[in-house]
Image: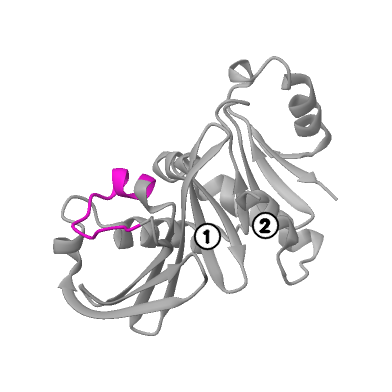
Amino acid sequence: MNCAQHCIQCDTPALTDKSIEQIALHIANNIDSNSLNLLKEYGYGRRGDHDFWEKLSADTTLYSCSYKVNHDTVVLTVFRPLNFATDFATTFNFDTSTFYQFTFFQLHDTVVKILRVDKHGEDHFNDTLVLTKELFPNQNPFTKFSELTAIKDELRFIGTFYRRDIGEFIDFWITPGYKLAYLPDSSKMNARSKKYWLEEFANGKIIKEHWSLIKAY
């Protein structure tokens, strides 16, 4: 199940139609090209009180991470870690023969604890004191997912949907029943699905050029 599907099912406070349109306008008026590019690279959905980000490649999820700030500790959980390590080279050994889930606890600039979950669902904790920049010497994943989470918090969406193989458009879920579609160039759409997506876009409320607010359910 991808991030967009999770966001549809999430527990979201009810918003009035006016509030939904205000959020949609806020997204359309304030998102920049850097944020758009990041959200095409990483899909977002929420499960409980955790933000989940999925690294996307066409219709495939390469890896996923949950990110949460708990007081002064930042908690980053990684699934499919070998793909994750291609983006975030690390000195940590991801032993996927025994474990499938890895969680790093960062306090300030230091990883102070690592939790590994084995294939029987058992937790294995290791206390550690290693600088994050030593554990991830090339690119800091905490910085990346902090940046993504800041975009989500500022724009107030609850999920995203993007598939490059379908077309150059992106959906922002505002509530489980409303999404905002950004369609900058309809020529870059999969011919087999183009008619469906263009009809859906046209049936929404155009709030700004290239932006349509769509009632999905």
* Picture residue at 49% right of the left edge, 47% below the top: 31
Which residue does the numbered mark 1 point to in the structure image? 52
Amino acid type of the residue that numbered disc 2 sits on in the rendered structure: His
The answer to whether residue 31 shows anywhere in this view is yes
Amino acid type of the residue that numbered disc 1 sits on in the rendered structure: Phe
| Magenta-span inclusion, residue 90 | yes
Q: Position of residue 60 (x, y in %)?
A: 54, 37
Instruction: Say if mark 1 contacts mark 2, CB within 8 Å.
Output: yes
Disc number placed over residue 142 in the picture, else none: none
Colour scheme employed for the rendering of this structure:
one colour
Q: Position of residue 57 (x, y in %)?
A: 49, 35
- Label 1 and label 2: CA atoms lie apart by 10 Å
Few, some or many residues within 10 Å of mark 1 (<14, 14–19, 20+): many
Locate residue 135: give its quadrant.
Answer: bottom left
The region drawn magenta spans 83-95
Few, some or many residues within 10 Å of mark 2 (<14, 14–19, 20+): some
The answer to whether residue 25 shows anywhere in this view is no
Which residue does the numbered mark 2 point to in the structure image? 6
Q: Nearer the viewer, residue 83 or 25?
A: 83
Q: Position of residue 129 (x, y in %)?
A: 17, 78
Q: Against 106, is 100 above or below?
A: above
Q: The residue tagged with tag 2: helix, strand or loop?
A: helix
| Magenta-span inclusion, residue 99 | no
Q: Nearer the viewer, residue 50 or 182?
A: 50
Q: Nearer the viewer, residue 159 or 58?
A: 58
* Picture residue at 23% right of the left edge, 49% below the top: 89
* Picture residue at 52% right of the left edge, 72% below the top: 121
Q: How many marks?
A: 2
Locate residue 75: give its quadrant.
Answer: bottom left
Q: Against 167, is 46 above or below?
A: below
Which is the main secondary structure of the residues drawn in magenta? loop
Q: Position of residue 73 (x, y in %)?
A: 34, 80
